[in-house]
Amino acid sequence: MPWRTIGQEAARRFLARSLDVGRVAHAYLLTGPANCGKTTLALDFARALVCTGDPRPCDLCPECRMLLGAGHPDVEQIEGEVDEAPEFSALWKAGASERPRRALRIERVRDLIRVMATRPSQAAYRVATLDGSTVQDAAASALLKLFEEPASRSVLLLRAPAVEALPPPIASRCQVVRLGPVPTPQISAWLQSAHAVPAEDATVYAALATGRPGLAQRLAAGGGHTQLDAQVALWLEMASADTVTRLDQAAVWGRNFPAARAALDLAALIWHQLLQLAAAQDAGRAGTEQAPLPALQTPAAHVLRDRGIAVLGAQLARIARASRLLDANVQPRLALEWMMLGL
Ligand SMILES: [Zn+2]
């Protein structure tokens, strides 16, 4: 399975071709929605760049095997550090160890610039992969140096939700490669073949994930179809529960970052589906749109759906805002409570 990216054929072809014709850019920016395959594609291309087999990546040569194993000396996979922005520290102290890594430290950028200036130690290219959203402020200014004096045979692979997520001086110097949503049948087939998910469940996860294989995989790993149905039912219940019940549940879902992330992701998927069902109903197509989850066909779901597009839309916006608060290092429980009180 040389390319591990699911779908994204156009992006894959473009990258493979730039390597085949020897026109590899110094920097690429892979853009697309969360969990659509940007990180996987960056690693696929990194492997292709250092691979000595044919076709590249081959998975079999020493370079490929090294990168798939403990890592390759010519490939840097750089993560951001925990951002200790003082305005947030009081809020997220409790869950600090579970924070996603955010900002890239300037010292790390300087190290990267030094490393990228040296010749590759054993492969044809020296490669670094980096989450573009971690490149902020001083780190961004420092990183520009890498673009101003790029070493030959050095390739930087940035990823971001959109071009606008990066400072313009950096984004404008990158070759942009756009990724899009992956077709649902393709995600379903992949869940079945690569992750041994039963066909019926795979269809549900793929439909819920709306084009994002990474999200479908996480749903599949969450304990199966029944477990997912139970979580959906709980969310629907919360929408009409009293304040005390909601705050109690916010404490459970907000106990740490991963739990809060999973709960909010699922809420976004549920409300997205409800909006689609409500829109179908408004357009006189009730019954033609099939909800992918049995839990979305229950009386509780119907009550919620019948509140109409405007209400559901406002609730979805609140879920999205809570999600951003979480990403901005607000304490998980606070983000959940804020969302629950306005649901
Ligand atoms: Zn290889």
Image (tube, rainbow, N blue to C red):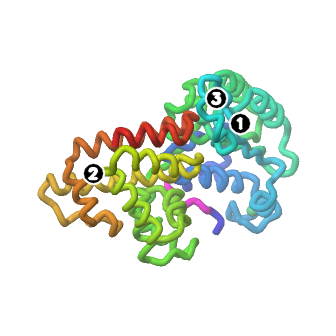
Q: Which residue type carries mark 3?
A: Ser
Q: Are marks 2 and 1 in contact (CB under 8 Å)?
A: no
Q: Which residue type carries mark 2?
A: Leu
- Residue that carries the numbered disc 1 in the rendered image: 81
Element class at badge 2: helix
Q: Quadrant of the N terminus?
A: bottom right
- Rendering quarter of residue 26: top right
- At a point 16% along the width and 62% down the height, the residue shown is 286
Q: Is residue 89 magenta?
A: no
Residue range of the region highlighted in magenta in the rendering: 4-10
Quick check: can you spot residue 162? no
- At a point 63% along the width and 50% down the height, the residue shown is 42
- Residue that carries the numbered disc 3 in the rendered image: 89
How far apart in space, not on screen, are marks 2 and 1 (Cα)?
A: 37 Å
Quick check: can you spot residue 139? yes
- At a point 77% along the width and 57% down the height, the residue shown is 67
Residue 192 lies, in percent from the top left, at 51, 74
Badge 1 local density, few (<14 within 10 Å), some, or many (20+)? some
| Of 41 and 165, the residue lying toward us | 165
Answer above or below: position of 274 versus 128.
Answer: below
Q: Quadrant of ligand 1?
A: bottom right
- Residue that carries the numbered disc 2 in the rendered image: 275
Which mark is in front, 3 or 2?
3
How far apart in space, not on screen, are marks 3 and 2 (Cα)?
A: 36 Å
Residue 262 lies, in percent from the top left, at 51, 53
- At a point 73% along the width and 30% down the height, the residue shown is 105
Residue 23 lies, in percent from the top left, at 65, 44
Badge 2 local density, few (<14 within 10 Å), some, or many (20+)? many
Answer above or below: position of 45 versus 222.
Answer: above
Badge 3 local density, few (<14 within 10 Å), some, or many (20+)? some
Which mark is in front, 1 or 3?
3
